[in-house]
Structure formats: structure tokens, C-alpha cells
Amino acid sequence: ATEPDPDGDVRDGVSAIHQQGLSSIKDIPVIIQAVRSRPTDKKCIERAFQSLFLLATEPDPDGSLARKEILTNGGMETLVSAIWDHTQNSQVLLTLFHALWAILVFNEEDEAFISKIPEFGVLEGLLFAMQSHATDSGIQDSGCDLITRLSGLLPADTPQFKPAVVLLCTNVKGIDVRDVKAYSSCLDALNSLCQLSDENKREFAKAGNDCHSAIIRGLTSGDHASLETQELACQLFWCVTSDRAAVAVLSSNCELLLLRKIIDALKSVPRAKSSVHLYSAACGTLANLALAPNNHIKMIDLGVVPILCEAICIYDFSVDVTSAACTALANLSASRDIRKLIASQGGTPALFSAMKSNLVNVNVQREAFRALHNLCESSSDGKQTIAADLEIIITSFFRHEGVKYIQQITCSIFCRLSGDEICRKSMMRVPGTYDALVRIMKYNPKKKLVQKAACSVLRNLSKEEEITPTLLSKGFDSLVIVAMDTYSDSEELQECACTFLMNMGSGEGIACIIKSMQTIPTSASLQQASCGALYAITNVDAHKHIAISAGAVDAVIYLMLVHPNDLKVLENAVNVLVNLSSLRKCTRTIANAGGISTVTEIMRSNPTSTGLILGGSRFIQNMSLSRREYADEALGGITPILGCMDEHPDCSKLVEESCKALRCLVLKSETCRDRLITADGIAVIEKTMNENSGSLRWQTLLLDELFQ
């Protein structure tokens, strides 16, 4: 008898098992042992792992039990060893890849097995085999599928992932786009890797134009690309361009080519539901590329805006498409120079369409709001187009009023629209405008920018007198006062608030107005507004008492000293003193604070300002009638009054108030009478009588006093 061949017995046993098929997992240890005992037997290896593949892909629970048995008996390390032993045999490698793909399916309790994948060097063996057979589409297809699966199992910082990106970027250049399976698998694997980390994205970006062009080629239907490869190519670039550093590495030629091919692809694909994923990825990529301002003009020239608007219209049912398209329009509209173009090419209606069709989705609303916020500054027509559909914005606000960003950007949109009179009228016609603004101010008491914008809106709205009762009924005066008190250091907020309170005529804000005078006294624009507001509000006696108690006299006089050359501040400040001095008990406070000398000095410094001389004359009337000594103190006002009358003899209101003031001085003070005569006052008065055809009552009364 001859001695039996043990190797032949093993091979025959594996063949028999393979041919008969396995009904249980009991033979798995035998198969794995057979591979270990015959590591160089290609036929044995191939049939053994074909059998393991069949077992591992059985429906669960049998498949799950088989995979666990394979792993428990060292199947994975045996498989990796076989890869290294047969790196030159593509047929064996393909069988090994299939088996590896089958057993890399894990349940939650299989963490121990997953952690051993790096330890067994699975990725190293896989990448070496793929590099050795770079032109074999079957190896590339199966290898890429494995990389995709491993990217979902291993930690994102696995060191071998970066070399995997480099390898795939090299190999993709040699894959024919007509080989849809291999080409798609490679794109899918690259996308999976780039999703893991920004480092992988940047590694892809550094791969060079040849690699990028090979992938961009997948977008072109003329190059036999399928809808699937177009989607995968767009998804890959969507992922990579989400990292600004990766975009910076991409060449400008690559970006321009990518833009052209994406737009060409969107123009050529059927407008059907089957294209929705392509549109989503394409719009996402366009949105990312639109983050770079240097791409904006290129994108406009390539016709991207109509494409984005069409995407919103056709795929209004897809949140992904509408969100990405709105984001692209928002990013593009960041450039002031092209906002008008976006609006003229249908951008605004498309954004409102997206908001209506995706009302419950906050991401769509957020991006649409951002784009509309930018387009508010496109032109007057652009603003008015947005204001015409303001109700959609209001509806969205109330649907998402708990979202801080929606609150803040709504307020900013209101701010930009309310500066235009036509837009303001539109805002007034939408009742929800007021309620939305109230809620915004209440929700954001600690947000200075929000409060500032809200006060600006109210300043603009309060220009329309017919809505004053509505604004007061909503409690805006109280909200503005709180904002003023909270942000006393904000010059712009204080100015807007003062103007609003002036238009409202509300006395509740007097203390805050005076506080703004004291806190930021050097701001001319603010003090013009604050003095103007105080002047308007102190027309009522009750408000005068409040102002005096709050320190208005000292505050106003100080502002006149700080702004000796700003006529608007001076005129408003003097008018405040005119109002306050109409209360007899206030005149002593004004005189003690140096008010008379300050006003007369201001009049002497600005003798040609009719508004200032007019206010000063009224002030002198009130002060002189109160006490005789105040008339003597106002002596310095006679010369500027006469000078202004002489220069403007036909200004009836100026002449009337000036004559009233001079008559009060003459009645109360002999010194003033003498000064008026010696200053050639009679000639000036007679000149005004010759220049005016109207009533000469006050000139006559003044002359009568002088000639007595």
C-alpha cells in the first residue's frame, strides 16, 4: 500500500465541502485549518474562502453565527495572511476580498472583533493588493467596497485612511468612466474617507488636476457617465468643498471646470424625481464654492442663478435640494455687486417659494432668511419686492420664533426694509409686523445688536403718524426705554430710541433721554436726537416737571458747551430751555446753572442762524418776564438779535419773536433800553417794518416803549 498524500486529502476535503454546500457552521474550523496548512495552495485557498463567503452571507441568524464562528477561529488574520501570500494572483485576491467583505458585518456586541481589524493589518494588506493591481477593475471595485465598509467601522483617525485617499486618487485616473461599477465604487470610497476628516479632504485636494479632472469627467454625460456616477462625483466634491482649507488647495482651473461641468450636468439631466440626489449634491457643491467671493462673478456668468431657482421650483418637495439652493443664493448674495443681478434673475421669488414649500424645516428657512437679508440691500425695487411678500417672512417667524437666529435676522430684515418709505407702508399693512417686533425685543433683552436694530425699525416706523396709537398700544415705548437703560453706551441705539420717543411724544422716556445726554455727551448725532426728543416731549407741563427733576437743565447747558459749533444740537438744546423756562419755578434753576449767559454767548457766536436766534429770543422772553435781574443778565443777546433782524428783515417769524424779546428786555431793564438804542436798534426795527407787508404789531409796540 502506498502512503496517502495528506495535502491532497485536505484539498479534496475542502473541495467536497465546497461542492456539497454547508448546512451548518460545524465545518468552519476545518476550512480555516485547511487554509493554514496549505497557505500556498491557490485552489484550496480559493475554494475555502468561497465557502466562507457563502456561509457569512446567509440570512441571519445563520449568517451572524457563521461570521462570529469565522472570527472566533482566527478567520480574519488567516484571510489577511492569504492576501499577502497571493498578492500577485488577482483571482485569489478577488475571492479573498469577497470573503472579507462578507465577514465585515458586525453587531453591537462585536466591538472586540472590530478593535482587532487594525491589529491584523487588514487595511495595509488591502491597499498593497490594490496598488499591485491598479489596472484590474475587479480588484479596484471590490477593494473600494471594502474601504467604504471599513470607513464605517474604524475610528476616523485611523492612520491607514490617509494613504487610502492617496492610493484611490492615483488609481481613479486609470479607471474608465464607462466601467460604471469600478468607477462608482472608487468615488464612493473616496467620499466615505473624506467624510471622516478634514485632513482626508485636504489630502484629496492636493491630489492634483489629473485626479480631479478624472472625477469631474464623471459629471459629463457625453463621457458615458451614468446618473449614479454624476451623483457620486458631485457628492464627493460637495464633501471636499465643505472644508475651506481644502478649497484653498484646489486650483482655480479645477474650480472653474467643476463649476462648468456641474451646471452642464444640471442642464442636461432629466427634470425628474430620479435626478433629485444629483441636484442636491450639485447645489450643495455650488453653495460651498460660493463661499469664495472670487467665484461669484464666474458663477453669475455661467448662469448659476436660474439653475438654482429652477432647482427650488422643480424639487420643492426635497428639503436637501431647497436647503442647498437657498444656501448657494445666500452665499452668492454676500457680494454687494451682484445682489441686483440675483434679484433680477428671479432669486427673490424662488426664495419665497422655498420658504412656503418647506415651512416646517428650519434649515431652509434659515438660509432663505439669510439670502433675503442680503437682497434687502440690492436696490429700492429689490427691497420693495421683498416687502410685498413680507407676510411669508412673518409666518415663518412665528413658526420658528424660538430659534434665536430667526429672531435676530427677522429684526435685521425689518431694519433694512423700514428705511424705505414704500416698504414701510407694506410693513404697516401686515399686522403681524408689530407682534413679531415685540416678541423679538422681549426674547433678546441682552442682545445689543438686536435691540439696536429694533430701535432703528421703530424710529423709521414712527415717522408714519397714523400708526402712533398702534405703536403705543403695543408697549414699544416701554421696551425702548428698557433698551436705552440697558445699553446706555450704544450711541446708535440711543439716537434711534430718542428719535422714536420724540415722534411718540411719550414722557416715560425722559429720564433715559437725559441719561443718554450725560453718558455720551460728545456724540453730535446722538445729542441732536436727544435734545430734539426732549424738546418735543416737554411741550406738556407734566413732562417739564419730570425733565427738571431728572436734571435736564444741567444736561442741556453742558451739551451747548460741548457742541458750540453744531447748530442742530444748539437749536434743539435752546428749544428745550424755551420749554422749561415757560415754568416760572424753573427759571431760577436755569439761571443758577448759567443758562442765560450760555444762551446769549451761543447767540453771539452764531448771529446768522435764524433758528438759533429765534429760539434764543423766545428763551429771553421767558427769562426776562420771570425776574428783572434776568433781563440785565440777558443784555448780551441784544446785539445778535438786532444783527439777525438786520440780515433777515423779511423773515416775519424771526422779526416777531425778536421784537417780543427786545420789548421784554426794555420793559424790565433800563440798561437794556439804552443798549438797544445805542446799538441802532430803532433803525433796524424800522427796516423790518419797511420789508414786511404783514402785521407790524410787535415792531410798533417795541417802538412805543422806546419812545416813552
Image (tube, grey):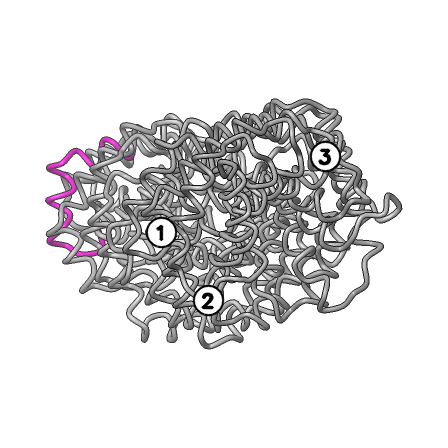
**Inter-mark Cα distance, 1 to 3:** 61 Å
Q: What stretch is highlighted in magenta?
A: 581-599
Q: Which amino acid does label 2 sit on?
A: Ser
Which residue shows up at 72% across the image and 39% down it? Answer: 137
* Residue bearing mark 2: 23
Which circle marks residue 102 in the picture?
Answer: none
Which residue shows up at 44% across the image and 49% down it? Answer: 699
- Residue 411 sits above or below residue 208 on the image: below
Residue nearest the observer in this picture, 673 or 415:
415
Residue nearest the observer in this picture, 549 or 607:
549
| Secondary structure beneath label 3 | loop
Residue nearest the observer in this picture, 5 or 330:
5
Q: Which amino acid does label 3 sit on?
A: Asp
**Inter-mark Cα distance, 2 to 3:** 34 Å
Number of residues whose C-alpha sits closer than 10 Å to that of mark 2, classed few (under 14), some (14–19) or many (20 or more) = few
The x and y percentages for residue 411 are 43, 57
- Farthest residue to the right: give it: 222
* Residue bearing mark 1: 450
Q: What residue type is labelled 1?
A: Val
Q: Mark 1 or mark 2: which comes first in sequence?
A: 2
- Farthest residue to the front: give it: 1
| Secondary structure beneath label 1 | helix
Comparing labels 2 and 3, the label whose residue is closer to the camera: 2
Whether residue 349 is visible to the viewer of this picture, yes or no, is: no
Q: Mark 1 or mark 3: which comes first in sequence?
A: 3
Comparing labels 1 and 3, the label whose residue is closer to the camera: 3
The x and y percentages for residue 378 are 65, 48
* Residue bearing mark 3: 136
Residue 596 position by quadrant: top left
Number of residues whose C-alpha sits closer than 10 Å to that of mark 1, classed few (under 14), some (14–19) or many (20 or more) = many
